[in-house]
Amino acid sequence: RIEQRYNTFRTLVKENCPEYMDVFNTMHPMKMYWGPIRLTRYGTFEYRGFDVNLPTYLIGTSILMKYMLKRIRNENLKVTPTDYGINEPFKIEGEILHVPPFTYVNEILQYESMVEGTDSEKIRKYMKRVYDFAYPAIPKQKDPSISRIKEMLQTGKTRSDIILKQAVKLGWVRDSTLPDEIAKQIALQGADDLEKEVNTLVDEELVIDL
């Protein structure tokens, strides 16, 4: 798939913007893949799904993932997709860690996360179960990034919800085109929020290995 995208993009550049072929030829083929999960030239996976989030969301999510996997490894748990895992995700029975089947995650949870977000009871429950499973293994539980994730779970408001509320407050009417002026104000506010957060985080001892 990466090769197909690379060749397609190469053809488009060559036909429409040949003056950029020198630039294109210096780019690694892996850069032509813009999916949410990308394989890098270093052999690692890059997750690109949190574009509008602040560092605390990204770090908090990474912390949960890190210690969820650590707990699975340290306790020798066997991650097993079961129908039981639909209603009781991340429940441990002996050495079995129940998770939903892939079809349920792909067809139900992924769809509802995109369309309803935290308004979906299924999504809120799944998020809380992930958090509850990973949290006991985290050594520094008062980390500001973990606090951010906890706040999101308590309020049900994601960064996207906050941005949408801001747009409405600035005069945007839902389901209409976002005016350029409002988009600019949101972008500038986002830049200010990022600067404040980075200045705060550099003074914190983060639990994740950065």
Image (cartoon, rainbow, N blue to C red):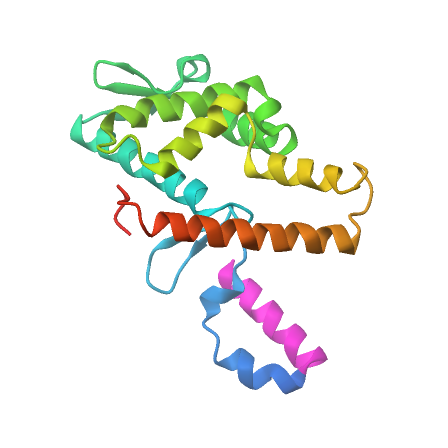
- The residue closer to the viewer here, 80 or 88, is 88
- The residue closer to the viewer here, 117 or 55, is 55
Left or right: 208 in relation to 59: left
Residue pictured at 61% horizontal, 36% vertical: 162
Image coords of residue 36 (percent x, y): 51, 49
Image coords of residue 31 (percent x, y): 49, 66
Left or right: 12 in relation to 142: right
Residue pictured at 79% horizontal, 36% vertical: 174
Left or right: 136 in relation to 123: left
Image coords of residue 190 (percent x, y): 58, 50
Residue pictured at 46% horizontal, 28% vertical: 151
The span picked out in magenta is: 1-17
Residue pictured at 39% horizontal, 31% vertical: 147
Q: Does the magenta stretch include residue 11?
A: yes
Asked whether residue 101 appears in the rendered view, the answer is: no
Q: Is residue 112 above or below residue 85?
A: below
